[in-house]
Amino acid sequence: MSLVGSAASSNAAWSWNLLNDVRDMFSYPFMVNAFRGGTIVAIVGAVVGWYMVLRKQTFAGHTLSVAAFPGAAAATLIGISATIGYFTFCIAAALVIAIASRPSRGRGFSAESAVVGTVQAFVLASGYLFATLYNGVLSGLNNQLFGFTFGITDAQVVTLGAVAVLVLGVLAVIGRRLFFASIDTDVADARGVGVRLLGVVFLLVLGAAAAEASQITGALLVFALLVMPAAVAQRVTARPVAGIALAVLIGVVATWGGLTMAYYTSYPSGFCITSFAFAAFIAVHRVRASA
Amino acid sequence: MIKAVLGVIPLAAGEAFVFGQPVGMANRDIGYLPQRRSFDASLRVRGIDVVRLGLDGDRFGLPWPWSAKNREAGRRVRDVIEQVDASPFALRPIGELSGGEQQRLLIAQALARDPRLLILDEPLDSLDLPNQSAIAELIRRVCVDSGVTVLMVAHDVNPILPYLDQVIYLADGGAVCGTPADVITSPTLSALYRTPIEVLRTSDGRLVVVGQPEAPAHHADRHTGQPH
C-alpha cells in the first residue's frame, strides 16, 4: 500500500496552480480516501484530545494508541482486517487501565500512571512478538507504527465515520458532566455526577479515538492528532467551546496540509501531519512567550 | 458531621432531618464547599466556567447556545459572581488566581443554585490574614443578603467569631452548643478540651480564644460555627 503512495508521489509535481494541484491530487481515489479518513480522525482526535489534555491523561492516551500496534500485528497474523485489531486491542487496553487503576476514594488518579506504564510495556512487547511470529513483512511493521494513510479503503472510511459518530455522540451526552468531573472532582462527586463511571467511559472513548488516529498517523505518531491540537488550543484560549473548536480547526488543517505535503514529496504522511501540528505548537509557544 | 448532613455517610444512631427531609434527600437545597482545594496553576479553565458548573454541571447533554434557558443560566452565573465581588477576575484562567480569589469563585459556585443551606468546610484555611477577614465578612454578607443558613467548620474560631450566631464545639467525643457568649468561656472550653483555654475580651468587646503555651497539642479539636 505504501508502494502505491510513493509511486504516485514521484510523478506528482507542485505547480502553484492550487486548483489544478487539488484536482490532480483528488484524481487518485486513495488520496480522496486519505482526506476523508484524515478529516474524520482529526475531528475526533481533537475533541477527545481536548478532554484528555484537560484530565492530564496523555500518558494513558499514548498507551492506548501504542496498543494499536499489537492489535494490527495480531490481526495481520491471523489474517483479519487490521481495523478490527486496532479497535479490539485499544478498547481492551482501555478496560484494563480502567479496572486496574480503580482509584480509592479521594486519592484521584495517583495509581493510574504506574498501571498505564505497565500496560504500555506489555502491549509493545506483544506487538513485537506478533510481528516476529509473522516473520518479517517489514513494510507492514512500518505501517503499523507510522501509519498507512494512503492505503485506506472505502470500507475503512465508513468504519472510521461510524466510530466517530458514536464517540462524538457519547461525548455530547456526557460532555458537561465529564468537564465537571475533570476539573472539580470532589464537588462533582458530592453532587452525584458519577465521577468513577465517567472516568471509565472516557477511557473507552479515548481508546476508540486512539484506535482511529493510529490508522492515520500510526501507533507512534498518534500524538499528532490527539495531543497537539488540544494542547495548542488550551494554550490559546481558556473557553471550553472555543478551545474545542480551535483544536478541531488545527487538527483538520494539519491533516490536510500534511497529506498534501506527503503527496507532493516522498516523505511519509505521518511525519508530514506531525510536522504541521508541531509547527502550530511552536508558533503558539513563541507567541505566548513573547506576550 | 458535614458528611452526615449531606447523607454521604450513614448515621451511627438515631435520625437526622434537613429541611424536614431525611438527610441526603435535601441536597438540592444545599450548597457545599469542600475543604480547601486549589486548582493546578496550569489549569486553563476560566473562573466563570467553574462557577457555571455549580449551576448545571451535573446535567447530561450540552447547553444550546442561543436558548432562553442558557441566557438565564448565564445571567444567574454573573449575578453570583457579582455577589462575591469576583467580576474583575472571573474571566481569567482559575489556575492563575490567588487563593483568596479562587475561594470567592468557589463560594459563588456553591451559591449558584440559590441554596437554603450553605456548608463551608474550612473556608479560611490557608488564606492570609487580610483574605481571611475579607472572606469571613463576605460570608456574613451573603448570609444576610440572600437569607441562606451558613454552616461552617473552622479550626481557628477567631476570624469568624464576630459573625457567629450559634457555635458548636466538638472535641474528645463531647460537644457544647449555644450562642458564642454562652459557650465561649474559659471554664466551658477548658472542661471540653481538658486543657486550660483562656477567653479574652478585647477593648471593643470582641472575644479571642487562646490556648495555654504549655497545652498539649490536640489533633481532634475542631470548632463548628453556625451563623444565622
Image (tube, coloured by chain):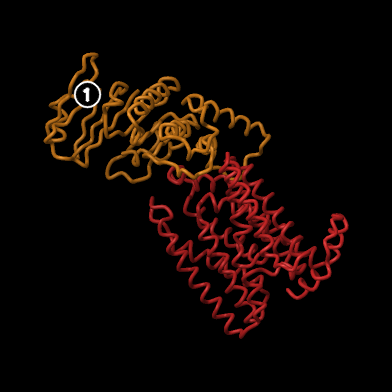
Chain colours: A red, B orange
Q: Quick one: which residue is furthest to the top in this view?
A: B204
Q: How many marks?
A: 1
B159 vs A9, nearest the viewer: A9
Q: Is residue A215 above or below residue B114?
A: below
Q: Residue A209's spot in the image, x, y percent? A: 62, 60
Q: Is residue A69 above or below residue B65?
A: below
Q: Residue A23's spot in the image, x, y percent? A: 87, 59
**Which quadrant holds residue A224?**
bottom right
Quarter of the image with the C terminus of chain B is top left
Q: Quick one: which residue is furthest to the front in this view?
A: A290
What element does badge 1 sit on? Answer: strand
Horizontal side, residue A23 vs residue A192: left or right: right
Residue drawn at (57%, 41%) of the image: A290
Horizontal side, residue B71 vs residue A27: left or right: left
A9 vs B118, nearest the viewer: A9
Residue drawn at (26%, 26%) of the image: B158
Horizontal side, residue B143 vs residue A241: left or right: left
Q: Residue A217's spot in the image, x, y percent? A: 65, 64
The residue that disc 1 covers is B208
| Label 1 crowd bin: few (<14), some (14–19), many (20+), radius 10 Å | some
Q: Is residue A266 above or below residue B174?
A: below
Quarter of the image with the N terminus of chain B is top left
Horizontal side, residue A157 vs residue B91: left or right: right
**Which quadrant holds residue B209?**
top left
Q: Mark 1: which amino acid?
A: Val
Residue drawn at (66%, 81%) of the image: A79
